[in-house]
Image: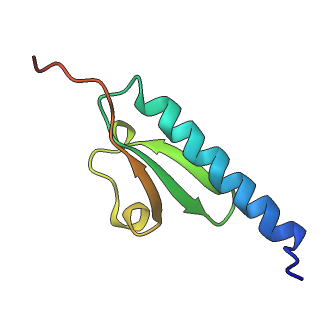
Amino acid sequence: MHTISNTAQTDNAAYFAACTRAQHRARSSYFTQYVIMDREFGYIAVDEGDYSPMPMEMIDRVVYAVTGKLDDEF
């Protein structure tokens, strides 16, 4: 029998919540949305447009990325 600890379940829930948030934000953004692993807050979704350029410290902690869906090119 395989048992998952409460910590692992909470960690997975936080990861999937951050991924869902990033996907939702990407629909209305020109910029890539990243999920970053944060020691203090767990997983957080950030917009590439908020950081120009993104610090290497943040890039090293990226665990998921969604390309922004808005495009001005026709």
Query: What residue is at 69 percent from the left and 61 percent from the top?
Result: 40
Residue 31, quarter of the rendered image: top left
Query: In the figure, is residue 10 to the left or right of 72?
Result: right
Percent across and percent down for residue 7 are 83, 69
When the figure is inspected, residue 70 is found, relative to residue 6, above or below; the finding is above
When the figure is inspected, residue 69 is found, relative to residue 13, above or below; the finding is above
Query: In the figure, is residue 74 to the left or right of 51?
Result: left
Percent across and percent down for residue 20 are 58, 40
Query: What residue is at 34 percent from the left and 42 percent from the top?
Result: 32
Q: Residue furthest left?
A: 74
Q: If the image is split into quadrants, where does the C terminus sit? A: top left
Query: In the figure, is residue 9 to the left or right of 23?
Result: right
Percent across and percent down for residue 35 are 50, 52
Q: Residue furthest bottom?
A: 1
Applied colour scheme: rainbow
* Numbered disc total: 0
Q: If the image is split into quadrants, where does the N terminus sit? A: bottom right
**73, 57: nearer the viewer:** 73
Percent across and percent down for residue 56 are 34, 66
Query: What residue is at 48 percent from the left and 30 percent from the top?
Result: 25
**71, 42: nearer the viewer:** 71
Query: In the figure, is residue 63 to the left or right of 37?
Result: left
Query: What residue is at 49 percent from the left and 37 percent from the top?
Result: 23
